[in-house]
Amino acid sequence: MITGANTGMGYETALELARRGCRVYIACRAKVEGETDPTETVRKIRRLSGNDNVHFRKLDVSLLGSVQEFAEMFQKEEDKLDILVNNAGVCAPSLVYTVCTVIMSFFICLCLTPGPTIYYSTLGII
């Protein structure tokens, strides 16, 4: 699973993992003006890698409800998560808060029961 994999390093990581035969989940926001459409990204990665096991799942790490919904959906679809690449991020010149009043440049933590604690970070892997 790679957050923010519709462009940049996340895209390149997703493409390489797909080329190596991995099942890849691109977890990012749905199409936002000015951003690459994640469904187009999935089609491109499938074509370039020859791997049809590449999937898009909507996730907005700035909204705790979205994180909770995503985590619950993922646990229903998969038995385990082998690799998590925390790539989604934001670079803000000053303090910016999500609608959930979490500082964007810090991190969002979601504790799930039963199961592991999953950390989503806008700074990198925690």
Image (cartoon, rainbow, N blue to C red):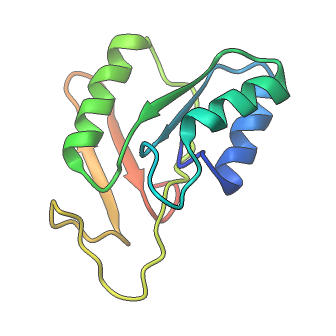
Q: In front: 31, or 23?
A: 31
96, above or below 39, in the image: below
Q: In front: 22, or 11?
A: 11
Question: How many marks overall?
Answer: 0
Residue 74 lies, in percent from the top left, at: 38, 22
57, above or below 3, in the image: above
- Extreme left residue here? 100
Q: Residue at x 48, y 65 (%)?
A: 123
Q: Residue at x 50, y 55 (%)?
A: 88
Residue 62 lies, in percent from the top left, at: 30, 56
Q: Is residue 70 left or right of residue 12?
A: left
- Extreme front residue here? 33
Quarter location, residue 70: top left
Q: Residue at x 23, y 65 (%)?
A: 98
Q: Residue at x 19, y 26 (%)?
A: 113
Q: Is residue 111 visible?
A: no
Q: Is residue 35 left or right of residue 48?
A: left
Residue 68 lies, in percent from the top left, at: 23, 36
Q: Quadrant of the N terminus?
A: top right
Residue 107 lies, in percent from the top left, at: 34, 61
Q: Is residue 102 left or right of residue 19?
A: left
Q: Is residue 115 visible?
A: yes
